[in-house]
Image (cartoon, rainbow, N blue to C red):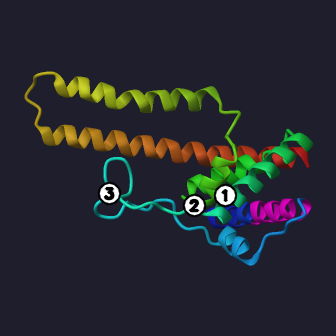
């Protein structure tokens, strides 16, 4: 599995389909929307100093171009699901963007794209990863001779293990999408 090739494949698929949907709607992407689609800003922006607990201190203007891209992505996804419900192209793209922390993940997520068809083992691993911090806190609350540094280490290992499980699940999902699309074609 080559992450760079997968990312390029997913990017070209999503960009091409959104551009086609924009042309079909009778209003092709303008230059600014096209540029935004290919160069989305990272969604991991932190609030500036002076932000309150309710969000940023200053109002942030709406990004009409980004809203249109999200609406086009949703229309394209729903149209593709109607035409070919067995296709896993959109799920493949979502998994690749999530694995690579690409900002198009936000656009697809807002369009309603979800990863379906998760096997039971994956669900069980997610439940175990979710319960492990609770178990660690229970063990931490128990009186004993363990040092706090040991518990910090245990909690860190649990976090890293859950991240590793998530990455493995995304890689497996990408591979399942790839195999399924070969079998369909």
Q: Tag 3 or tag 2, which sits nearer the N-term?
A: 3
**Image quadrant of residue 133?**
top left
User: Do the CB atoms of the residues marked 2 and 1 lie less than 8 Å apart?
Assistant: yes
Q: In this figure, which residue is indicated by the disc labeled 2?
A: 62
Percent across and percent down for residue 74 are 75, 49
Q: How many discs mark residues in the rendered view?
A: 3
Percent across and percent down for residue 126 are 50, 32
Q: Which residues are magenta?
A: 12-24
Q: Is residue 2 among the parts visible in the rendering?
A: no
Percent across and percent down for residue 80 are 86, 47
Residue 67 — which label? 1
Look at 32% across and 57% down and name the residue there.
51
Element carrying mark 3: loop
Question: Is 160 in front, or is 65?
Answer: 65
Left or right: 16 with respect to 32?
A: right
Q: In this figure, which residue is indicated by the disc labeled 3?
A: 51
Percent across and percent down for residue 152 are 21, 42
What distance separates the C-alpha of mark 2 from that of mark 3?
A: 18 Å
User: Do the CB atoms of the residues marked 2 and 3 lie less than 8 Å apart?
Assistant: no
Q: Quadrant of the N terminus?
A: bottom right
Look at 62% across and 62% down and name the residue there.
3
Magenta segment includes 147 = no
What distance separates the C-alpha of mark 1 from that of mark 3?
A: 24 Å
Q: Tag 1 or tag 2, which sits nearer the N-term?
A: 2
Predominant SS of the magenta segment:
helix
Element carrying mark 1: helix
Question: Would you call the spot at circle 3 few (<14 residues within 10 Å), some (14-19), or many (20 or more)?
Answer: few
Look at 56% across and 29% down and name the residue there.
123
């Amino acid at each position: 599995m080559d992450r760079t090739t997968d990312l390029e494949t997913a990017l070209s698929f999503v960009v091409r389909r959104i551009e086609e949907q924009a042309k079909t709607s009778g209003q092709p992407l303008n230059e600014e929307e096209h540029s935004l689609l290919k160069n989305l800003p990272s969604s991991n922006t932190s609030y500036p100093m002076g932000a309150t607990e309710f969000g940023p201190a200053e109002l942030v203007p709406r990004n009409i171009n980004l809203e249109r891209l999200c609406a086009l992505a949703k229309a394209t996804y729903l149209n593709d699901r109607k035409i070919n419900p067995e296709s896993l192209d959109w799920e493949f793209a979502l998994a690749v963007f999530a694995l690579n922390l690409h900002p198009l993940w936000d656009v697809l997520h807002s369009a309603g794209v979800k990863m379906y068809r998760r096997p039971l083992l994956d669900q069980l691993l997610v439940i175990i990863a979710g319960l492990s911090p609770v178990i660690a806190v229970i063990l931490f609350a128990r009186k004993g001779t363990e040092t706090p540094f040991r518990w910090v280490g245990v909690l860190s290992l649990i976090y890293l293990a859950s991240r590793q499980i998530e990455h493995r699940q995304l890689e497996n999902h990408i591979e399942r999408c790839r195999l399924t699309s070969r079998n369909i074609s």
